[in-house]
Structures are given as structure tokens and as C-alpha cells.
Amino acid sequence: MTTLIPRVLVVEDEGAQREMLRYNLEAEGFSVCVAEDGDEALLMVAEESPDVIVLDWMLPHVSGIEICRRIKSDPRTRLIPVVMLSARGDETDRVRGLETGADDYVVKPYSVNELIARLRTQLRRVRPATLGEKLVHEDIILDPLEHRVHRGPHTLHLGPTEFRLLATLMERPGRVWTREQLLDRVWGRDIHVDMRTIDVHVGRLRKALMAHDGPDPIRTVRGTGYALG
């Protein structure tokens, strides 16, 4: 089973709906965090770095539409998929939700199984390793289900942290990750890790990737962080 667990933020003001979603998503192997209103949702997006967001349209104080607009207008969060929930089923409402930036639109009442399938579709686009799909970059293959990494004909031996670090880099080749972003994605915000520890683990990953004389695939961006390729 993959050690890369997808993180879902559920934004829903109705307590029964919120807990039903939490229960069903956790039963399907998701890590779930919840928010009751728009302000809390924006705080959770910043603190939890979710992989996908389930966002109710009708929220107190600030609507889901406005929250979606803010998420999608922020360069730090605009790539997080947003699946909007709404009792508004008219075509004009669907179009408005999608034009605001929602990646998918689900009308209430809905099937939980269908919602989970839609979440997996979004994750397959942005974080395929969390669903057990193999990642390939040049001659490097990462298999989350088998927890194996190959470079060319060689099997590489990585610790769990280096494995998650490589998966993060391979899901977005070319993207420059800051140390803070890697800390959130690989270690989680609840873990207190010195920034220099990140450099140590990148060094270990580099050593493993170059163990059989292959070129170094990790690029150091001075003053910023790291990228693959």
C-alpha cells in the first residue's frame, strides 16, 4: 500500500454533512481536514496544504464561490483542485462555478461514491502517486504500490523520507520547490524540522540516484530550493 496519502480539505458548514464526508473519505484512505466557513477554509488551505478541496457553495459570511476565486487567484494555491458542492443545479450556476475556477461541480444530493471518484480524477491529474500510479521521469521509475525506485536497470534503496521527497519532485518535473513547500509536502506542518534537515535528505536522495554513475537529476536553485530536471 502506498505511503503517499492524499490530503483532502472538506469545507462544509452543515455538521452532519461534514462528518459524513470525513468518515467516508477516511474509510477510502484519504487524510481529511475540515473547515466550517470560508475564513477557516482559507486558513486551512494555508496551514494544511491540501491536495484537493471539497468546497460547499453556500457558506456563512463568505460564499464558496468567493473562496474558490481567492484560492484560484493566489499563485501559491491556484493549482489545488477544487470540487464544488451545491444545491444549485441550473446550467447558469454550474457555468458560474466553473468560470470562477472550480475544477468540478457536484449537485446535491449526490452519491458519495461518485464524489470520491471525481476526487480521484482530480488527484490523478495533480498527485498521481497518491493513487498508486507509477511516476516516470527520464530513466527514473517510482512505483508507490511496491515502494520501489528504479533508475535504468538498477533498483535504488531509499528511506521513506527520500521516497516521499522523490515522489514530490517527480510529480512536477521542472517545478522549483522552496524548502518550506517541501517541508509541508514531505514532512507535514505538524512536524518541526530544521530547514537544514531538508538539505541533508536531498543530499541522501542525490547520492542514491547517482549510486550507479548516473547524472544528477536534481537541480539546486540558489536561495530558493530544488527542482527535478
Image: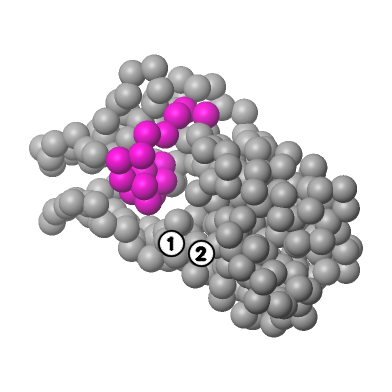
Q: Secondary structure at mark 2?
A: helix
The amino acid on which the numbered mark 2 sits, given as a three-letter code, is: Gln
**Is disc 2 surrounded by few (<14), some (14 to 19) or many (20+) residues within 10 Å?**
many
Alpha carbon distance from label 2 to label 1: 5 Å
Residue 209 falls within the magenta-colored stretch: no
The amino acid on which the numbered mark 1 sits, given as a three-letter code, is: Arg
Residue 147 occupies quadrant: bottom left
Residue occupied by mark 1? 125
Residue occupied by mark 2? 122
Range of magenta residues: 165-180
Observer-nearest of 99 and 189: 99
Image side of residue 60 versus residue 194, left or right? right
> Colour scheme of this structure image?
one colour
Question: Residue at the spot x=65%, y=63% of the render?
Answer: 96
Residue 97, how many percent across, how many down? Answer: 65, 63
Q: Is residue 224 above or below residue 130?
A: above
Image side of residue 107 versus residue 140, left or right? right
Residue 177 falls within the magenta-colored stretch: yes
